[in-house]
């Protein structure tokens, strides 16, 4: 966590516990970008790696709702918000997801909304 921050997000609240106590986070906290990397790993391990995912066109929204602290155990909830077939590529659909990370106490720490491009079964079937 600290090594990531040192290279990619070198702010006091991510690097040093003493300095972090003086910030609005009140203590050492993971960089939000580090937490997004953890979220992505959890997504790939849980289903994306075994799916027909073709990647994502971008991220619609990310919200860091609560600091993630060293030693926090995180759980992922995935919600499908909507689906649609691609207009230009009949072999592909877009699935819009909301990914939510929670700490062990059930506090909502992060929300990320994105669409994944997914291969479609029966792409030649009428829509």
Image (cartoon, helix red, strand yellow):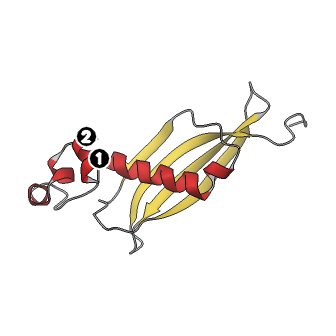
| Residue 93 percent across, percent down from the top left | 72, 38
Residue 26 drawn above or below residue 80:
below
Left or right, 82 with respect to 62, comes to: right
- Front residue (pair 28, 89): 28
Residue at 29 percent across and 47 percent down: it is: 4
Q: Quadrant of the N terminus?
A: bottom left
Furthest residue in direction front, as rendered: 3
For label 1, the residue is 4
Q: In which quarter of the image is residue 102?
A: bottom left
Q: Where is residue 75 in the image (x, y as percent from the top left)?
A: 47, 66
Q: Where is residue 57 in the image (x, y as percent from the top left)?
A: 56, 32
Name the residue located 18 percent from the left edge and 51 percent from the top edge. 15
Q: Alpha carbon of mark 2 to alpha carbon of mark 1: how far?
A: 5 Å
As helix, strand or loop, the secondary structure at mark 1 comes to helix
The answer to whether 81 appears left or right of 70 in the picture is right
Q: Position of residue 8 (x, y in %)?
A: 28, 39
Residue ranking furthest to the right: 125
Position of residue 19 in the picture relative to residue 102 (left or right): left
Label drawn at residue 118: none
Local SS, label 2:
helix
Residue at image location 74% in from the left, 28% down from the top: 87
For disc 1, the neighbor class at 10 Å (few under 14, some 14 to 19, many from 20) is: some
Quadrant position of residue 92: top right
Vertical side of 51 occupied by 117: above or below? above
User: Label 2 neighbourhood size at 10 Å, few (<14), some (14-19), many (20+)?
Assistant: few
Are dots 2 and 1 in contact, CB under 8 Å?
yes
Residue drawn at x 28%, y 63% as measured from the top left: 69
**Where is mark 2, residue-wise?**
7
Task: Please identify the quadrant where the C terminus is shown.
Answer: top right
Residue 90 relative to residue 47: left or right: right
- How many discs mark residues in the rendered view? 2
- Is 96 in front, or is 16? 16
């Amino acid at each position: 966590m600290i090594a990531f921050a040192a290279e990619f997000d070198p702010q006091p609240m991510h690097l040093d516990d003493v300095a972090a106590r003086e910030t609005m986070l009140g203590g050492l906290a993971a960089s939000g970008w580090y937490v997004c990397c953890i979220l992505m790993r959890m997504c790939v391990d849980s289903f994306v790696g075994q799916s027909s995912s073709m990647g994502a066109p971008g991220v619609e929204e990310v919200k860091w709702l609560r600091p993630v602290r060293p030693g926090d155990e995180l759980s992922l909830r995935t919600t499908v918000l909507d689906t649609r077939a691609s207009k230009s590529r009949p072999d592909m659909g877009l699935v819009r997801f909301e990914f939510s990370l929670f700490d062990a106490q059930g506090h909502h720490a992060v929300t990320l909304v994105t669409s994944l491009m997914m291969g479609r079964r029966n792409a030649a079937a009428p829509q």
